[in-house]
Amino acid sequence: MEEAGLSLFCPLFNEQDSVEPLVTEALAALRPLGRPFELILVNDGSTDRTGELAEALATEHPEVRVVHHSENLGYGAALRSGCEAARFPLVAYTDGDRQFDLQQITLLLDRIAENDAVVGYRMDRQDPRLRLWAAKGYNLLIRALFGLKLHDIDCGFKLYRAEAVRALDIRSQGFFVDAEMLIKLRNRGCRIFEVGVHHRPRVAGQSTVRLSHILDTLREIVRQWRELRA
């Protein structure tokens, strides 16, 4: 029996130095799996050469497709676009900064048969200390407000059953989207499993997280909390 097909998508914003090695690494990880697959590059309104390079890679590799946003709509919008564009029953995503070892997609796939979502958590996370402290506080806040007992809510390496994630009404435009998806999956009785994954330092580009994103995330947390109480 043929294995279920896999759509892997990558949100990209101004990642011109990462997009080509990202595609090379992703194809090297996906081709040996023995299942149909596609790689979707979601160009979220990049102002550098990310979109141009992504299109060239799609021309070179038939497994690669590109989705463009005409302007930068945010991480949540990029995740929604990737999920909507996916053609296969399994949908995975990873960030375009290449901080995850894509060979470890097998760790997620090994657990998806008995679950609706398999989510990574970063072992020995390779980020600046301030960001580590912020992430710890964020995870504690989400756990306290929503009872979502996961190690690493915003880890950018996750695998979903397409039918489960498409049933969700995802509204977040920004970085709260990971938490919103997991909260709504949990509330629908879906099965979520965590696996530890390696994390690498960023070697190209810069983080796009800004103070405004943090404030937007706090507003979305309040909105979600009020909706659930109502």
Image: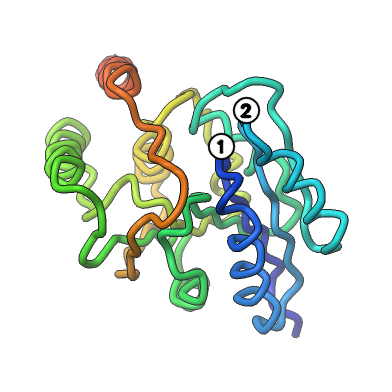
**Residue linked to disc 1:** 14
Residue 84, above or below 71? below
Mark 1 Cα shell of 10 Å, populated few (<14), some (14-19), many (≥20): many
Residue 203, above or below 183? below
Residue 71, above or below 158? above
Residue 136, above or below 20? above
Q: Which of 74 and 211 is in front in this view?
A: 211
Residue shown at the point (20%, 36%) measured from the top left: 142
Q: In what element is the residue under mark 1? A: loop
**Residue linked to disc 2:** 47
| Residue 208 horizontal/vertical position (percent) | 41, 33
Residue shown at the point (78%, 50%) measured from the top left: 65
Residue shown at the point (85%, 61%) measured from the top left: 60
Q: Which of 179 and 227 is in front in this view?
A: 179
Q: Which of 191 and 172 is in front in this view?
A: 172
Q: Quadrant of residue 58?
A: bottom right
